[in-house]
Amino acid sequence: MTIQELPFYDRVDHALHDDLLKTALNRATTRFIGNRTNAIGALSDEAALRDQARALRAHALAHLDELLVRLADGVEARGGKVCWAVDGAAACRYIVDLARERGVQRIVKSKSMASEEIHLNKALEEADLQVIETDLGEYIIQLAGEMPSHLIAPAIHKTREQVGALFEEHLGMAPTTEVPPMIRTARQALRQSFLRADMGISGVNFGVANEGAVVVVENEGNARLSTSVPRIHVAIMGIERIVERLEDLGVLLQVLARSATGQKLSVYTSVISGPARPGEADGPEEFHLVLLDNGRSKILGGPYAESLMCIRCGACLNACPVYQSIGGHAYGGVYSGPIGAILTPLLQPDLPDVHMLPQASSLCGACQEVCPVRIAIPDMLLRLRADAVKAGKYHPVEKAAVQGYATMMRNPTLYRASGRIARIGSRLLGRKGRIRRLPPPLHLWTRRRDFPALPEKSFSELWEEREAEAKRKQS
């Protein structure tokens, strides 16, 4: 059984006890946060650029139907084919049928969260097609038989020591913990895959409606090889990932790179507008664009429409104290972190325990603070929690606890008595102002942190003493 198949609390508990995971997450998120801070700080007017990026995403969503038709018409005018996929099954079916019709045997893929969302690799492998992930992070987790645990760094949960052991086992690499030899080993293993592939599959960072083109952003060059060397290129794009003009793209690429990896721009930005033209030396013979809905149109116009503004930079994951502690696999779905706690219940509502994901947040607001398009993530997490309660998805003990709390807060006498009892217990349990272990069921809180001991007097008591002292002085 994989960690994704465990109940939510078991996944979290497993992650919290994984020391290697803690090491890997600490190394990576610390670096990402520092890089982002430096890159964003170098902008002359960060706030204005982020406001502009948000406005562009809002405009695109408000005119989505029109822009998608314009994009599809442009692709077809340049010799490409467009598939309107209502769900993941339709998208997988289209790609599998295309591969069979064209006699495809080997497929290379560049990083694509949309393809992970619809479990495309599984569908292709069940059709007896060989699929090789070419992004280094995706290649690592493919060898490990795992899902990605981060939006931009799929193997963020792996230490270099674990990757080295993986390459020793699968690729025959000599034992090492140095990164350059690992990269050379992966490059040598992947090089022939590009040359032998019949089909290349990529994700899409943005579609540009006016140009009839898709944009792929990367740092390794594998996406350029996947999209240009094989004779067929299939691009999978969530329908919300669209902009109207190339000028809009210029704004969004700036905030994407800075928020994701701390770069001014990613190393490679490819604008693809169809198959190779006559006389062009590079490019595929066929270009197919799969426009994936898979529940997105149902989100539009509703209370969670703002979640579709996400440009998949991963900044909210890096900043989230919960993600920093449990990583991505504990969330159970393809999308993790704060934005994943919103998208997964909306796009994959049939996953077990999916209603519990919005609870995996401290609501500290760090996610919204770093989001390049200022998505109100905490507000939507609270709304999803309320939706779960309305649907009756809560534990009976939780209901009893909330009802007891409400009763206490409505009764001043009971409230004061509870406070006095709590302060007495706090003094008995506390040492030097801290409580290291609370009694069950509150012991779960102190399993990972201390609880502050309550003060000797409540605020109300201190206020009454102040008022009494003031009256005494006046008299």
Image: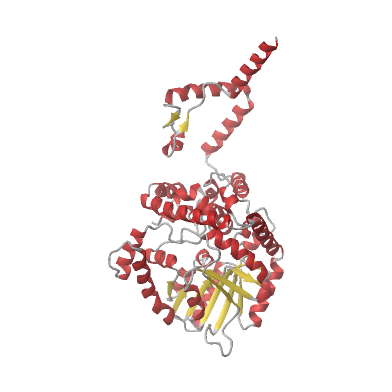
Colour scheme in use: secondary structure
Residue 62 point in image, percent of width and height: 71, 62
Q: What's the residue at 56%, 70% (across, down)?
A: 204
State the image coordinates of residue 311 (x, y, percent, origin top left). 59, 61
- Residue 407 visible in the current orientation: yes
Q: Nearer the viewer, residue 217 or 134?
A: 217
Quarter residue 475 falls in: top right
Q: Position of residue 439 (x, y in %)?
A: 43, 30
- Dividing the picture into quadrants, the one containing residue 131 is bottom left
Seen in the picture, residue 75 relative to 55 is either above or below; the reply is below
Q: Residue furthest bottom?
A: 279
Residue at screen point 71% across, 65% down: 63
Q: Is residue 168 left or right of residue 16?
A: left
Residue 315 position, x and y percent, is 54, 55
Is residue 245 shown above or below 436?
A: below
Residue at image point 42% right, 38% down: 447
Quarter occupied by the N terminus: bottom left
Asked whether 180 or 288 is in front, the reply is 180
Q: Find the residue positioned furthest to the left.
A: 174
Count of marks, rendered view: 0
Q: Is residue 313 visible?
A: no
